[in-house]
Structure formats: structure tokens, C-alpha cells
Image: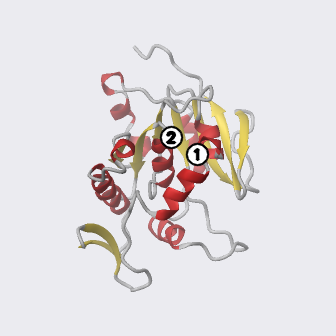
């Protein structure tokens, strides 16, 4: 994808930051130890809808492909609950921010155990199939959280969402879902806005609801022998 001309990367106090040449946003970096993520981890844990949607037989000792990593927040929460998470991000700028944030997290004694369950691959996930299955690599769950068009009825979004909307723009969810369902995984979890229609309703198995949206869960036709 083409990166926006308004954004560039710079180093501030030892962190790579997204710098807005227009002056609309303050310099922004990814911090896997920010207060919001700490609070979310401590207060929700395995009872949160994301964990329930991703778990297999109530277990989170699994490998998750986060195909639309964004700022890596859901990936970080899943890693804190025991998942190994492979993050893929198509925006080169976001991917570099994730690499920098993950590098700092791996050096933080309070985060090392979580950080070592995370990895990042830059690029469009649908073009990376061969990478995931080299040396018999295995994915249990595919997690999709594409960027949806901004609602004209919703309150002004927070800074993180504004940055993602600026960098990524709307992403088509159905091609991603159709691609994911072909992978040899147990299931695919698609994050959706609350009132959006179900994609591929004939394939939907169940849903996990949140306060502002839902997770649609589809069981893959898992391939046991990929030979």
C-alpha cells in the first residue's frame, strides 16, 4: 500500500515515533506497557470477549495469526494471556513502530515474558502464505480486525483510531475472511461493529458480544495433513 505523504518516522528519546508533518497529531509511538493496556489486562483477563472468542476448548496456549495487527493492542493482550501471536501489518510505518515497540518491550523485565510471545511481519498478509507454512509452521486461530469506514453517527474517535484511519483507510473485510477460512487453522475470528451485517452467514458458527461490537467466529475446514 502507498504510505501517506503527511507522515514520517523520527526518533524521540530513544523511541521511533510517527510524526505528522501537518501538525494535526503529536508524535506517536507504540508502547506495549502503557496504562490502558495494563488496566485492560488486569481487569478483564481470560473473561474478556476477545479471549473467549479466540480460545480453543477454553485454552489460550495457542498460536494466533493477527492478520491486521494495527497498533498491536489486541495481540499484546492475547500474549499476556498465554497466546503466541504472529502480527502482520501492511502499513510499513505501523510495522516499523511495532518492531520498535516490541524491541523495547523485550528489554523491559516486566514485559519480557509477554514480548517473547510476540513477533511482527511487515506486509499484506494475503501475500505471505508461503512464509507461514515453511518448516511446518502452524497457526491455530486467525484473528481479523480490519479498519472499517468511520461512522457518521459515532462520537469523535480517540487518537489511536484516528491515526489508524489516517494510515490505513477502510479495509475490505470479506476478502480477508474468505482468505483466512482457507488456511489450515481451527478457526477464524472476525471483529465487527455492533450493527454490521454478518459476512458469510452460512459459514458463521457463533458470536461473542462486546459492549460496542462483536466477534464473529468461523470454524475453518482444518487440513490435518498439509504434505
Task: Report the front residue among 141 and 5.
Answer: 141
**Residue at image location 37% in from the left, 60% down from the top:** 94
Picture coordinates of residue 116, whole percent (x, y): 33, 41
Q: Element type at marker 2?
A: loop
Task: Report the front residue among 219 and 201.
Answer: 219
Left/right placement of residue 48 relative to residue 32 reads: right
Q: Element type at marker 1?
A: helix
Picture coordinates of residue 174, whole percent (x, y): 61, 46
Instruction: State which tag comes first along the sequence, 1 or 2.
Output: 1
Res. 175 image quadrant: top right
Residue picked out by circle 2: 81
Graded by Cα atoms within 10 Å as few (under 14), some (14 to 19) or many (20 or more), the crowding at tag 1 reads some
Determine which of the numbered discs, if any, sits on residue 201 in the image.
none
Left/right placement of residue 39 relative to residue 226 reads: right
**Residue at image location 41% in from the left, 58% down from the top:** 33
Picture coordinates of residue 102, whole percent (x, y): 32, 52
Location of residue 219 with respect to 110 vertically, above or below: above
Q: Quadrant of the C terminus?
A: top left
Left/right placement of residue 153 relative to residue 61 reads: right
Residue picked out by circle 1: 45
Task: Report the front residue among 44 and 205.
Answer: 44
Q: Check whether the beta carbons of the residues at disc 1 and disc 2 lie within 8 A of each other.
A: yes
Q: Quadrant of the N terminus?
A: bottom left
Graded by Cα atoms within 10 Å as few (under 14), some (14 to 19) or many (20 or more), the crowding at tag 2 reads some
Q: Is residue 168 something one can see in this rendering?
A: no
Amino acid at each position: 500500500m502507498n504510505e501517506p505523504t503527511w507522515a514520517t518516522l523520527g526518533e524521540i528519546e530513544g523511541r521511533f515515533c510517527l510524526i505528522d508533518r501537518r501538525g494535526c497529531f503529536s508524535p506517536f509511538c507504540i508502547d506495549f506497557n502503557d496504562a490502558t493496556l495494563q488496566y485492560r489486562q488486569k481487569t478483564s483477563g481470560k473473561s474478556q470477549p476477545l479471549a473467549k472468542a479466540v480460545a480453543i476448548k477454553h485454552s489460550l496456549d495457542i498460536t494466533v495469526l493477527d492478520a491486521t495487527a494495527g497498533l498491536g493492542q489486541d495481540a499484546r493482550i492475547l500474549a499476556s494471556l498465554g497466546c503466541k501471536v504472529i502480527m502482520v501489518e501492511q502499513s510499513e510505518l505501523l510495522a516499523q513502530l511495532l518492531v520498535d515497540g516490541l524491541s523495547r518491550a523485550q528489554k523491559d523485565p516486566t514485559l519480557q515474558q509477554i514480548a517473547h510471545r510476540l513477533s511482527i511481519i511487515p506486509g499484506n498478509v494475503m501475500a505471505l502464505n508461503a512464509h507461514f507454512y515453511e518448516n511446518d509452521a502452524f497457526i491455530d486461530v486467525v484473528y481479523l480486525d480490519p479498519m472499517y469506514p468511520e461512522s457518521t453517527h459515532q462520537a469523535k474517535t480517540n487518537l489511536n483510531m484516528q491515526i489508524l484511519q489516517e494510515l490505513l483507510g477502510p479495509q475490505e473485510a470479506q476478502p480477508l475472511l474468505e482468505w483466512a477460512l482457507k488456511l489450515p487453522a481451527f478457526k477464524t475470528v472476525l471483529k465487527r461493529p455492533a450493527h454490521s451485517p454478518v459476512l458469510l452467514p452460512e459459514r458463521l458458527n457463533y458470536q461473542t458480544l462486546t459492549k460496542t461490537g462483536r466477534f464473529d467466529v468461523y470454524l475453518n475446514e482444518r487440513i490435518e495433513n498439509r504434505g
